[in-house]
Image (cartoon, rainbow, N blue to C red):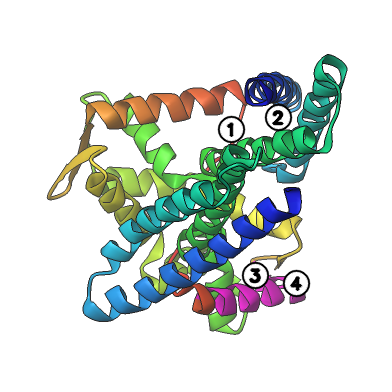
């Protein structure tokens, strides 16, 4: 039963990964990369339903859905870390430069030359796109109700865990 | 019956791990995100759940597997959340806007503040601590380990269909 559940989870996760990868290629080529991001949630949900239906009668049915979703979270975290990782991008810039850089040069070269300002602009655009804050011309803010809630929760948790040196 | 028992023990285990996490992080703050230690606390919570289940309902392989699957989900979901909490630039920006006098800031002010802060320097220090870069005087260089990680990440990015944007 345990092995059966593990095999179902592994197979459906593999299918999900392949389908998601194909959707990235297809929607990217069509000029709709955002659709591929939404597709992640869609395909992950379909996979979860698939695990549930294929394990009817197995006592690990609902637990296996959670295990499958764990794999999907790892996939999302890995993808996010690779594409949006701040530290990884610093390493990548150092790799492409081929030689050492000063701290100031590394700041300016960040993100292939967009610099730290480019990083901030990108993050602000994402936050704006998620409906967490308003942005008009050069003015950033105010936060929306959702943004305010997210900001308070995030900073509150950082304070509770004494995470002083953050991103 | 098993599902409610599993959920109950998993909740107790997660609470135990969460309490330990809070205690350790408050007692010993660190610049290092300490993901390994967090995983260890998760493992302690999992062992606590298994032990509790065995004491209250008797241990069987299916129940242990169910507790494990649930716990894996909780630990991975929390790690995903914690990674953002510990290092997210977006949360820093949201926090800064919360404290702005009229809740708005010009982009230049925000960017100047960020550039003058030591947040970038802190990343370099972290990368140095992890032996991914070598800092000699004013110069930062990629170490052999950093080069290996970057090349692996680049290949993996190609497999997953993305680019290293930062």
Asked if marks 2 and 4 fall on the same chain, the answer is yes
- Residue most extreme to the left: A137
Relative vertical location of residue A79 with respect to residue B105 in this rendering, above or below: below
Q: Identify the mark nearer the N-term, 2 or 3.
A: 2
- For the residue pair A122 and A13, the one nearer the viewer reads as A13
The reply to whether residue A153 is visible in this rendering is: yes
Identity of the residue furthest to the top in this view: B56
Residue at disc 3, secondary structure = strand
In this rendering, the answer to whether B132 lies above or below B147 is: above
Answer yes or no: is residue B118 visible. no
Q: Which residue carries the number 4 mark?
A: B145
Q: Residue furthest bottom?
A: A98
SS under mark 1: loop
Residue with the mark numbered 2: B29
Location of residue B3 in the rendering, given as x and y in whole percent from the top left corner: 64, 26
**Number of the label disc, if any, that sits on residue A164:** 1
Q: For this rendering, which residue is in front, A47 or A26?
A: A47
User: Where B21 falls versus B133 (above or below)?
Assistant: above
Label 1: few (<14), some or many (≥20) within 10 Å?
few
Number of residues whose C-alpha sits closer than 10 Å to that of mark 4, classed few (under 14), some (14–19) or many (20 or more): few
Q: Which residue is drawn at 62% across and 26% down?
A: A162
Whole-angstrom CA distance, mark 2 to mark 4, is: 27 Å
Q: Both on one chain, marks 1 and 2?
A: no
Query: Which secondary structure dominates the residues rendered in magenta?
Result: helix
Residue A126, position in %: x, y?
30, 51
Label 2 with label 3: CB-CB less than 8 Å: no
Q: Where is residue B104 in the image (x, y as percent from the top left)?
A: 21, 33
Left-right relation of B83 to A34: right
Q: Mark 1–mark 2 contact, CB under 8 Å?
A: yes
């Amino acid at each position: 039963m345990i092995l059966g559940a593990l095999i179902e989870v592994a197979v459906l996760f593999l299918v999900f990964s392949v389908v998601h990868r194909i959707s990235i290629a297809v929607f990217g080529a069509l000029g709709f990369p955002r659709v591929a991001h939404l597709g992640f949630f869609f395909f992950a949900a379909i996979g979860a339903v698939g695990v549930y239906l294929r394990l009817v009668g197995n006592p690990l049915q609902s637990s296996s859905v959670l295990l499958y979703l764990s794999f999907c979270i790892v996939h999302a975290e890995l993808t996010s870390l690779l594409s949006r990782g701040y530290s990884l991008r610093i390493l990548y810039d150092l790799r492409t430069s081929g030689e050492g850089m000063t701290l100031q040069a590394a700041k300016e070269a960040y993100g292939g030359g967009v610099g730290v300002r480019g990083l901030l602009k990108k993050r602000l655009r994402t936050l704006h796109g998620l409906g967490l804050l308003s942005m008009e011309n050069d003015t950033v803010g105010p936060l929306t109700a959702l943004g305010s809630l997210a900001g308070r929760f995030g900073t509150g948790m950082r304070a509770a865990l004494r995470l002083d040196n953050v991103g | 019956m098993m599902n409610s028992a599993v959920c109950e023990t998993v909740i107790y285990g997660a609470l135990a791990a969460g309490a330990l996490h809070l205690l350790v992080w408050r007692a010993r703050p660190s610049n290092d995100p300490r993901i390994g230690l967090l995983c260890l606390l998760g493992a302690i919570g999992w062992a606590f759940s298994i032990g509790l289940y065995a004491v209250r309902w008797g241990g069987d392989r299916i129940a242990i597997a169910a507790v494990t699957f649930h716990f894996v989900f909780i630990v991975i979901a929390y790690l995903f959340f914690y990674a953002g909490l510990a290092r997210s630039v977006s949360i820093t920006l949201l926090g800064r806007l919360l404290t702005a006098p009229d809740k708005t800031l010009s982009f230049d002010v925000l960017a100047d503040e960020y550039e003058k802060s030591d947040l970038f320097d802190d990343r370099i220090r972290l990368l140095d601590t992890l032996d991914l870069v070598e800092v000699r005087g004013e110069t930062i260089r990629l170490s052999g380990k950093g080069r290996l990680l970057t090349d692996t990440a680049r290949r993996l990015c190609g497999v997953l269909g993305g680019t290293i944007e930062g």
